[in-house]
Image (spheres, rainbow, N blue to C red):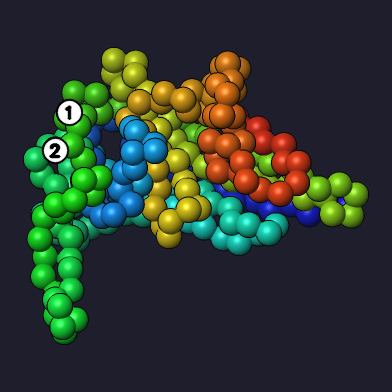
């Protein structure tokens, strides 16, 4: 008998994700030490805030649960009404880098200051021309099987979104189990093309299993994805 686990978007969150298709006012992030890495250029980790032209802002993060000897995750979409935008960095206006909080030397107080270390904030070109109008949103659903016999298991998880802009270029939002609540954002698909298109050629060292974070898992996991419109 196969043990199965589903980590799918609840209907209210699925509806919020679908409503992200349309014009955006901004895409914001929380700056910090895990925001970017020289080992993964073009990939940013944070909790993100999508500010549509109409409707509530939506916080995008990762929901992580332990299962089958590891951690599984899905994207999470939460509506926000009250948020201090000055504390967040912006992909649309890169000069807005947000604020971080640091403790005083005696650790009795703290202060807010702009992030001043490399990789703690976004320093690329404005993404407003690309993402100010998202024309379609598609859901990435992973299906994983492993084990055999009485130890067989499987899970299904809603891992990410494909965001298509008015010029046809695609960006990715992916859930990540590596850092608490942080999701991953890729302004350009790049090596992750196979996540969007399972028929795309495989790049050595960047298989679907590795890109989704299971390259170091023990056992023979079979990983597949399907992409569906919302």
Query: Camera-side residue: 148 or 160?
Result: 148
Mark 1: secondary structure = loop
Label 1, on which residue? 125
Toward the right, the furthest residue is: 149
Q: Which residue is drawn at the image coordinates 54% and 51% (left, top)?
A: 73
Label 2, on which residue? 94
Earlier-in-chain disc, 1 versus 2: 2
**Residue 35 percent across, percent down from the top left:** 30, 48
Q: Is residue 101 above or below residue 20?
A: below
Q: Is residue 188 above or below residue 158?
A: above
> Can the viewer see residue 230 in this picture?
no
Q: Which residue is drawn at the image coordinates 19% and 51% (left, top)?
A: 117
> Can the viewer see residue 172 in this picture?
yes
Q: Is residue 204 above or below residue 16?
A: above
**Residue 194 percent across, percent down from the top left:** 54, 24
Query: Camera-side residue: 50 or 106?
Result: 106
**Residue 129 percent across, percent down from the top left:** 19, 23
């Amino acid at each position: 008998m196969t043990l199965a686990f589903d980590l799918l978007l609840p209907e209210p969150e699925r509806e919020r994700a679908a409503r992200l298709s349309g014009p955006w006012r901004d895409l914001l992030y929380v700056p910090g030490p895990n925001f970017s890495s020289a080992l993964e250029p073009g990939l940013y980790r944070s909790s993100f805030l999508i500010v549509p032209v109409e409707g509530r802002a939506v916080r995008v993060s990762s929901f992580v649960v332990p299962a089958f000897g590891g951690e599984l995750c899905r994207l999470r979409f939460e509506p926000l009404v009250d948020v201090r935008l000055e504390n967040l960095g912006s992909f649309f206006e890169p000069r807005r880098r947000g604020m971080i909080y640091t403790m005083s030397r005696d650790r009795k107080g703290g202060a807010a200051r702009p992030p001043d270390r490399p990789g703690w904030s976004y320093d690329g070109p404005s993404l407003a021309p690309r993402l100010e109008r998202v024309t379609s949103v598609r859901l990435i659903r992973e299906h994983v099987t492993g084990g055999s016999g009485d130890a067989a298991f499987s899970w299904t998880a809603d891992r990410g979104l494909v965001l298509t802009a008015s010029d046809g270029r695609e960006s990715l939002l992916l859930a990540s189990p590596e850092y608490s609540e942080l999701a991953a954002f890729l302004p350009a698909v790049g090596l992750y093309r196979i996540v969007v298109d399972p028929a795309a050629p495989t790049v050595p060292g960047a298989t679907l299993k590795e890109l989704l974070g299971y390259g170091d898992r023990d056992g023979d996991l079979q990983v597949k994805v399907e992409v569906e419109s919302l």
